[in-house]
Image (cartoon, rainbow, N blue to C red):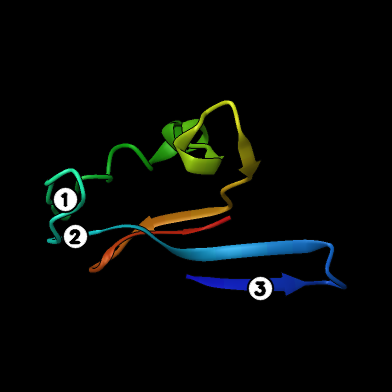
Amino acid sequence: MEFKAIGEGKNLYIEGYASVFGVLDSYEDIVEKGAFKNTIQGKNFKRIAFCYQHEFSTVIGKIIELREDEVGLWFKA
């Protein structure tokens, strides 16, 4: 992940991978390429929230870019 402050410290951006492909995670799942394709297209993109510790009641930012690449699901918020 990379953290950036842009514009006199008023905006803080975080970018990195929310999920990577082909790696066994802590829940013993392996995410395959294409897993996010339908979810991040069109109107569905607006349903995705940037939350603290996966708590939907604690939204901490706005996702401004989200894409699937060869590595995984990349985001900027």
N-term-proximal mark, 1 vs 2? 2
Label 1 close to label 2 by CB (< 8 Å)? yes
Q: Nearer the viewer, residue 12 or 74?
A: 12
Q: Which badge, 3 or 2, is on the more N-terminal residue? A: 3
Residue 47, horizontal then vertical, whole percent:
48, 30
Q: Give coordinates of residue 68: x percent, y percent.
A: 31, 57
Using the image as rendered, state which of residue 18 and residue 46 is in the foreground.
18
3 or 1: tag closer to the N-terminus: 3
Residue 51 shows in the view = no
SS class, disc 2: loop
Decide if residue 2 is on the left or right side of residue 27. Answer: right
On the image, which quarter does residue 18 sit in?
bottom left
Query: For mark 1, what is the residue?
Result: 31
Residue type at tag 3: Lys
Residue indicated by mark 3: 4
Q: How many marks?
A: 3
Q: State whether residue 51 is above or below residue 4.
A: above
Q: Is 34 placed left or right of 41 in the picture?
A: left
Residues at discs 3 and 2 in contact (Cβ within 8 Å): no
Can you give x and y, in whole percent of width and height, for residue 31 in the image?
16, 50
Label 1 secondary element: loop
